[in-house]
Amino acid sequence: MTERVVLAYSGGLDTSVAIGWIAEETGAEVIAVAVDVGQGGEDLDVIRKRALACGAVEAEVADAKDEFAEEYCLPAIKANALYMDRYPLVSALSRPTIVKHLVAAAKKHNAGIVAHGCTGKGNDQVRFEAGISALGPDLKCIAPVRDYAMTRDKAIAFCEEKNLPIATTKKSPYSIDQNVFGRAVETGFLEDIWNAPIEDIYEYTSNPATPREADEVVISFKEGVPVAIDGRPVTVLQAIQQLNERAGAQGIGRIDMVEDRLVGIKSREVYEAPGAIALITAHQELENVTVERELARYKRQVEQRWGEMVYDGLWFSPLKRALDGFINEANQHVTGDIRMTLHAGRAVVTGRKSDESLYDFNLATYDSGDTFDQSKAQGFIELFGLSSKIAAKRDLA
């Protein structure tokens, strides 16, 4: 029986060439699988037909936008997930979504190998292969660019030799990955970390320096889930899409950072994630109102670890699943409304309202009607600082 390989297929030059390249290198039949996570671009049926024209024995396409938003982006919003306190895990979240479809296709078509188009230098090879091994421990992984030295020059030559139905002339100076949760841009002149980004690299966001009217928005949550925008019900996908448009129009969500890659190098990345940043900002503030202090403090530690695990490709790991349980429990009372002003590249919270609020006006006020018994503060401070006081007497002796 001929070996079968399931290939993560984007419809671009590299993965189109990979179909024939893998067949020649391994003698295997290739099944192409394309997953729509809101990256835009060509119609899925066009991509499916191209895969077949490039030599795939079968091609599957999946509209996974809602799945991606609800099962992958939503947990990140609940976790306030920002890798290195800045990056909302745009690419890292899409990989396990794609992996799930690749493994399902491998089982369906009795394929023993899964292939992807990643290089040997980035994080995505780890995310794909760690995820594949978690969902399909018996599956093998190959990466033509990494394993078979499929350079771009060789890919173009192969494409022209085989007369494959894909353009080979247009080449962006950047490496770009995008989905509904955001957009990542790297390489080209950005590799010199002294060079400032230029406006040409941005698509999801307008220039925040351009004068424009501010946009006020009210985001409603139920147990950590965004359920309405300005009082109109939305799905998670719709919430992200609408805020991509509105926050993006105000230049919100631009991130230029040097990040620590899993493979041990530092890499300069420019991100656009207007909807993600607006939603996480709103969710964080609603947690400030509704989550008890000690739980909130501990959750911040969990959030950092959760974000690191997802960045590192461990979405399907036992610890990640256990942390999900904690995060969901911590979101039980995160219900209410957050009002924000979107303007000049910033999403600024201006109002909070929740039936689950722990904010007590009568305890917080400094005016008449204050119910906080200030007479108890002196004894509290004495006991709270007692251990430090005792140690200080010893150390100063």
Image: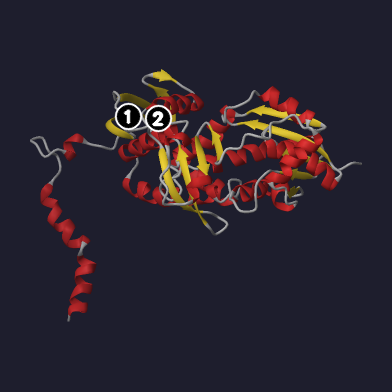
Quadrant position of the N terminus in the picture: top right
Q: CA distance from mark 2 to mark 1?
A: 8 Å
Q: Residue at x 16, y 61 (%)?
A: 382
Task: Tell which of 251 and 336 is nearer to you.
Answer: 251
Residue type at tag 1: Thr
Q: Position of residue 82 (x, y in %)?
A: 44, 45
Q: Which residue is mark 1?
A: 210
Quadrant position of the C terminus in the picture: bottom left
Residue 333 in sight in this render: no
Residue 217 in sight in this render: yes
40 over 380 or under it: above or below: above
Q: How is the image coloured?
A: secondary structure
Residue type at tag 2: Ser
26 vs 265, left or right, is: right
Q: Which residue is mark 2?
A: 206
Q: Residue at x 43, y 39 (%)?
A: 198
Q: Residue at x 73, y 36 (%)?
A: 16
Mark 2 surroundings: few (<14), some (14-19) or many (≥20) residues within 10 A = some
**Rendered image: mark on residue 112:** none
Q: Position of residue 118 (x, y in %)?
A: 65, 46
Q: Identify the secondary structure beneath mark 2.
A: loop
Task: Tell which of 376 and 61 is nearer to you.
Answer: 61
Q: Position of residue 293 (x, y in %)?
A: 32, 47
Mark 1 surroundings: few (<14), some (14-19) or many (≥20) residues within 10 A = few
